[in-house]
Image (cartoon, helix red, strand yellow):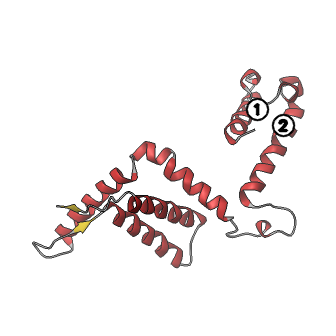
Amino acid sequence: MNDAELIRALRCCCALWNDKNPCDECPLPDEKRGHELHDTCDEYLMRIAAERLEELIGGTAKGTKAETPGFDFKRQFILSQAEHCVCGKREQDYGSPEDNFGRIAAMWAAYMRGNCVSDGANICIAPKDVAAMMALLKIARIASGNAKADNWIDLAGYAACGGELEGIGDDQPVRL
């Protein structure tokens, strides 16, 4: 069962708790689903969900690092979360990194020209510069001593976008 099917099955079971009967939509095998078998359904789903979570965070058995509070995300989890961010909904919402970071570069250049440099100064910011400066923002948050796992995930995402921009040669600065 892939992640999307697991989520769909969990949502179907949630609907059962609300007196709905979405079992026909459930991706579980026939022998594992059904309102009459709800206890079986729950146990099966919870076991699969727990296994999937253990895979994502690297295991939670007694005595493992994941049992302790704080940051204990595996590299694979951080990278998969960053991939989900930069290759998923954010790109759908805001456009490609080239386009989005190009707009940000233009706005930053205009702001800097109006507020930070003397008249006539040449301000050139490329989309890859935006990725680098956003990565620096995340590094500054990490350096504050109050970092959150999300800072590391976002940092990986900005690094991936910057690397892609570097790789495609989109280093044309925005000049205003």
10 Å neighbourhood of mark 1: few (<14), some, or many (≥20)?
Answer: many
* Kind of residue sitting beneath label 2: Asp
Q: Are marks 2 and 1 in contact (CB under 8 Å)?
A: yes
In the image, farthest residue toward the left: 120
Identify the amino acid type marked 1.
Cys
Q: Residue at x 86, y 62 (%)?
A: 61
Determine the secondary structure under disc 1.
Answer: helix
The image quadrant where one finds the C terminus is: bottom left
Q: Residue at x 71, y 40 (%)?
A: 2
Q: Which residue is mark 2?
A: 42
Front residue of 22 and 108: 108
Residue at (69% x, 64% y) in the render: 74
The structure residue drawn at horizontal position 18% and vertical position 75%, both measured from the top left corner, is 117
Q: Position of residue 138 (x, y in %)?
A: 48, 69
Residue 13 is labelled as: 1
The Cα atoms of the two marked residues, 2 and 1, are separated by 8 Å
Query: Does 158 sit left or right of 4 as displayed?
Result: left
For label 2, the SS is: helix
* Image coordinates for residue 33, horizontal then vertical, percent: 83, 27
